[in-house]
Amino acid sequence: MTGIGSLGGVLGGYLLGRFSGRLTISDWILGSALCTLAAGAFADAAYHVGGEPRAETPAAGSGSRALGLGSFLREPLLLRLLLLVGISQAFAVIVDLRFQTAVFTAIPGMDAQAAYYGRYYSLLNAGTFFLQFAVTPLALSRLAPGRIQAAIPAVHVGLGVWALLHPSLSSCAAAYLAFKSVDYSLFRSSKEIFYMGLSFDARYRAKELIDILVYRFGKGSTAFLIAVLQRAGIMTIAIFSWSALAGGLAWMGLALPLAWPSRRDRRPQPSS
């Protein structure tokens, strides 16, 4: 689903890069709004056809049990996944803003920037498509998901060092492209495997808490902190690069135990 979805990004990016200047920014915003409405209608139809997942146990009721909070105490792996998602999305905000700052610095003019973004995101989504259908199946068939999770931030740290030593639009664009394309393919696919064999509460309720609430909180809180620092006039592209490197190292520290899990962090086996 993620791989097929990237085809829309390839097409949208191509159209934006091809026709920027002929259509105004307002036209593109209106088109995006119409696409969002169409996507919402298809999503609603899909739930009507497929229905909601049913619990293997009676309804969880209200309170913390309905949110699956008790699963974090019973299954410690969930807490590590929660922290992993949080730090990865904080990292996403930093490399995104560093990339945007580099674009605004290197490319004057709104239409020229829009054309660049269109070509860039078309390439990014093409990379996601390739990784999802060619690299991810090969990697998951030969490597444990924990090893993949540990290798991903190592790649980002390497690109972060390059962007720090040679700050430019090319280095910042490469770092962000690597993050987004890997995030939509290898990262998410290998992360999903950790939920297999866990309880229903962990797979649906706790996972939803991680993938929706923590995912957004990681982005929102990081963006808020950066806005405060920018307001104080102490946030530059060099500080973005140092922050991205620090975030990548913190991410690596969280992911390494998944490559060589302790008995406490091992995911439970499916019950018979």
Image (spheres, helix red, strand yellow):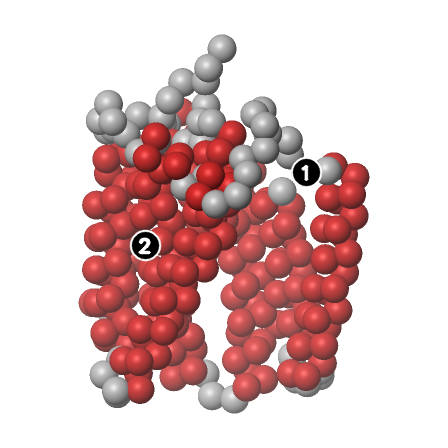
- Residue 97 rendering spot, x and y as whole percentages: 38, 72
| Residue 188 in sight | no
Could you tell me if the residues under marks 1 and 2 are in contact, i.e. CB atoms within 8 Å? no
Residue on which the image places disc 2: 87
Image location (x, y in percent) of residue 17 = 62, 72
As drawn, 145 above or below 23? above
Looking at numbered disc 2 in the image, what kind of residue is underneath it?
A: Ile
In this rendering, the label closer to the viewer, 1 or 2? 1
The earlier-in-sequence mark between 1 and 2 is 1
Please name the residue shown 79% across and 39% down the image: 49
Please state which of residues 64 and 198 is positioned toward the viewer in this rendering.
64
| Label number found at residue 52 | 1
Q: Residue at x 31, y 73 (%)?
A: 225
Q: Residue at x 36, y 46 (%)?
A: 82
Relative side of 244 to 67, left or right: left
Three-letter amino acid code of the residue under disc 1: Glu
- Compute the Cα span from label 1 to label 2: 30 Å
> In the image as oriented, which residue stretches furthest toward the top?
272
User: Where is residue 91 drawn, in percent x and y?
Assistant: 33, 60
Q: Name the residue located 74 percent from the left edge and 64 percent from the top edge.
A: 37
Picture disc at residue 26 = none
Q: Is residue 210 above or below residue 230?
A: above
Placement of the N terminus among the 4 image quadrants = top right
Secondary structure of residue under mark 2: helix
Q: Residue furthest front?
A: 62
| Residue 164 picture location, percent across and down | 23, 67
Label 1 residue SS: loop
